[in-house]
Image (cartoon, helix red, strand yellow):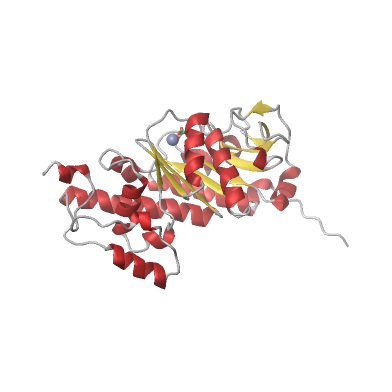
Amino acid sequence: MEEYIKMNILDTEFMQGFIRMANDGWEQGWHERNGGNLSYRMKPEEVVQGKESFKEGQWQPIGAKVPGLAGEFFLVTGSGKYFRNVILSPEDSLCIIEVDKQGENYRRVWGLVNGGKPTSELPSHLMNHEVKKKATDGKYRVIYHAHTTNVIALTFVLPLKDEVFTRELWEMATECPVVFPSGVGVVPWMVPGGREIAAATSELMKEYDVAIWAHHGMFASGEDFDLTFGLMHTVEKAAEILVKTLSMRPDKLQTIQPEEFRHLAEDFHVSLPEKFLFEKQGTQSTAPVEKQGI
Ligand code: 2HA
Ligand code: ZN
């Protein structure tokens, strides 16, 4: 006998995982008002699970070309929607979109029952997905943008350089180089929502899993909800420790040294790019505040 279980799309594992992650981000304080956005590239079997409840809308331009995502389906947060409300009314806050065969247009197939559009950062999300899908052989499925308080604070006092941010964050917690061994990239301040910032971010995503947007927030990418949320959380926690440290005094009395990072890399089987393991003067922070002699 053929067994067929009709499943409510809201009860599916990917939908529940997405909702939980959105709510976890809200509870961390990273999503004031409508801040932040989240997207997930669905697996073929999840598209099949959802198909029953799909209703196709009109094709709309993405605002970027992503041929590597032709025919893919994404669950994404809606533009102007609040992370705070996702858990209460996912069908109002979220939508599933389908990308066309050229990778130039999308159409809504589910959600946003009271109208609206996918996230204003759709070009960044999709261009990042395209880069990560290619770079990881399809493994990475999640792109997450959050307004992480401490990372944002650091973009006012640290030089906006990949090397500086990576090294400072790595020094703040021993787990950091193991959790993000390739480091973090930094995008200077740019107008959000467009193709230009999307191109700059996706360029960094070729090398890193994390991109910091100066005076705005962070993008993180990973295989699944746990890994991507955990990555955002780890980077932001390291930033919080650095903010606390810099608030006590501008220099460090002791810290993890380049040679110690190399030993850590050996034991934990990660490879840490040498460009982050430069020699510093003593244990001083690279924060400009120290250069001012305060
Ligand atoms: O409001 O975070 O970057 C959503 C955003 C835009
Ligand atoms: Zn934002």
Query: Is residue 77 left or right of 231 when viewed as pictured?
Result: right
Q: Residue at x 36, y 50 (%)?
A: 236
Residue 95 at what x, y percent from top left? 62, 37
The total of numbered circles placed on residues is 0
Note whether 174 is above or below 202 in the view shown.
below
Q: Quadrant of ligand 2?
A: top left
Q: Residue at x 38, y 52 (%)?
A: 235
Residue 169 at what x, y percent from top left? 32, 53
Q: Residue furthest bottom?
A: 267
Q: Is residue 141 visible?
A: no
**Which image quadrant: the C terminus?**
top left
Query: Is residue 237 left or right of 56 when viewed as pictured?
Result: left
Q: Is residue 238 or residue 70 the one in the foreground?
A: 70
**Which image quadrant: the N terminus?**
bottom right
Q: Residue at x 65, y 52 (%)?
A: 12
Q: Residue furthest left?
A: 294
Query: Is residue 192 left or right of 39 when viewed as pictured?
Result: left
Q: Residue furthest right?
A: 1
Q: Is residue 8 or residue 287 the one in the foreground?
A: 287
Q: Is residue 18 visible?
A: yes
Note whether 63 is above or below 90 in the view shown.
above
Residue 52 at what x, y percent from top left? 76, 43
